[in-house]
Amino acid sequence: MTSKQPNVRAHTVIDPRTMGRPVHLLGGFANQLRDDFADFLRARINRRYKASFQIDAISFVAAPADSQRWLSYGVDDGRIHFAIERPLLLCLLRYRYGSVMPETSAATDSVAPPSAATIDEPETATEERLGTMLGQQLIELAVRRIESVQRAPVETPAPVTFAEASLQGASDGEWLLRLTLSETRCNVGGDLLLKISAVWMNRLLQALAPNRERSRQKQMTATKPFPARLQLTLQARLLEKEVSLGTLLDLRLGDVLPISVGDADVLIGDSRLFTASVAEHHGKLCLTTLADVD
C-alpha cells in the first residue's frame, strides 16, 4: 500500500532588500558595466599581451553570506570589495611576465593551463600586487559607471584607496556582481567578483530611476480626490474700525489709532466662511480656533 504524498505548493521567497527598489533596472546597468570591462580586457590585456580573455556571463544579485577572501577598497565614503579566482589571475600573471609566448601563426596554439601544483602553492608577492592593481582598475571603472548614471554630473571621480585583504561575510544592503571569464589559449575559466557596499548601491538605485519616482508622484497627485487637489486662497480680515470723517482728515504722519484685535473674518473672495481668533507666536500673527459662519 502506497501512502499519498501531500500536495506541497512552492512559494517564491522575496528578498526584503529588493522591495520598493528599482532592482529590475540593474540588468541594463550590468550590461553597460560588461561593455566597460570588455573594453578594458581588450585594450589593456588582450591587445598588449596577445591574450584571449573574454566575458562569458554577468549577473547582479543581493550578496549572500560567504567566507570569500576579499580585497577591500575604500571609495569615497563607502567600500567595494574585489576577488578573482586564482587560475584566472595566474594565467594573467603568465601573460604579463612572458611565460605565454605570443602567437606565431594564424592558428591559435593551445597553452597548458596553470597546474594544480601551481595553484596550491602559496601566493607570491608578485601575484598579490597584480591582483591589487587589477582590482583597483576594475573598481575605478565600476565607480565611474555608477557616477555616470547619477542625476548630477560628478566633476572629479571618487578616489579609490586600498585596504588590506580580509575575510568577511556580506553585510546588509551589499550586492554581488559576478563576471564569468574564460581564456581560450590557457584553457582556463573562472569568476571575477565585485561586492558593492550599501552606500554605493543606494547611490546607484536612486540614480537609475529618477523618472519613475517623478511619474509616481504625478500619479499619486492625479488620484487624489478633487477637493484635495482644488487650491483656494484664504484672506483674513483682522479688524474694522469706524472713525468720523473729521478724525480721518485730521490724521497726520505719526498719529496712532487705538485698536483692539478681536475675532478675524476668513474669506474666499468676498465670501465670509469662518471666524478665527488671532494669536501671536514667535512674533507672527496666527489664526486659531476657526469656526464656521452660521
Image: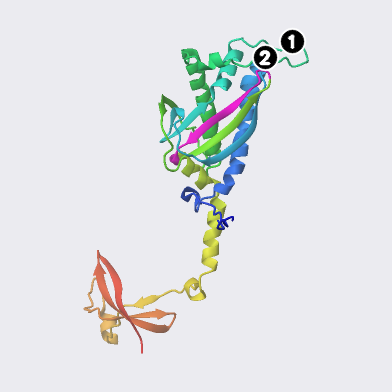
Q: Position of residue 284 (x, y in %)?
A: 28, 66
Q: Quadrant of residue 268?
A: bottom left
Q: Of the residues shown, which amino acid type is indicated by label 1?
A: Thr
Expressed as whole percent of the image width and height from the top left, the position of residue 106 reads: 78, 15
Q: Quadrant of the C terminus?
A: bottom left
Is residue 198 within the magenta segment?
yes
Q: Is 66 drawn above or below residue 253 in the view shown?
A: above
Span highlighted in magenta in the image: 185-199
Magenta region, mostly helix, strand or loop? Answer: strand
Q: Which residue is mark 1?
A: 104
Q: Residue at x 57, y 43 (%)?
A: 26
Q: Quadrant of residue 189?
A: top right
- Residue at left offset 36%, top offset 86%: 293
Label located before the other in sequence (1 or 2): 1
Say whether residue 249 is left or right of residue 82: left
Report, in whole angstroms, how far the alpha carbon at label 1 lies from the one at label 2.
Answer: 13 Å
Q: Residue at x 43, y 26 (%)?
A: 161
- What residue does disc 2 label? 111
- Asked if residue 79 is among those painted magenta in the image, a careful observer would answer no
Name the spot of residue 174 as percent of width and height, x first: 46, 40
Q: Residue 56: x, y in percent?
A: 65, 31
Above or below for 84 versus 174: above
Q: Which mark is residue 83?
A: none
User: What is the three-letter code of the residue carrying label 2?
Assistant: Val
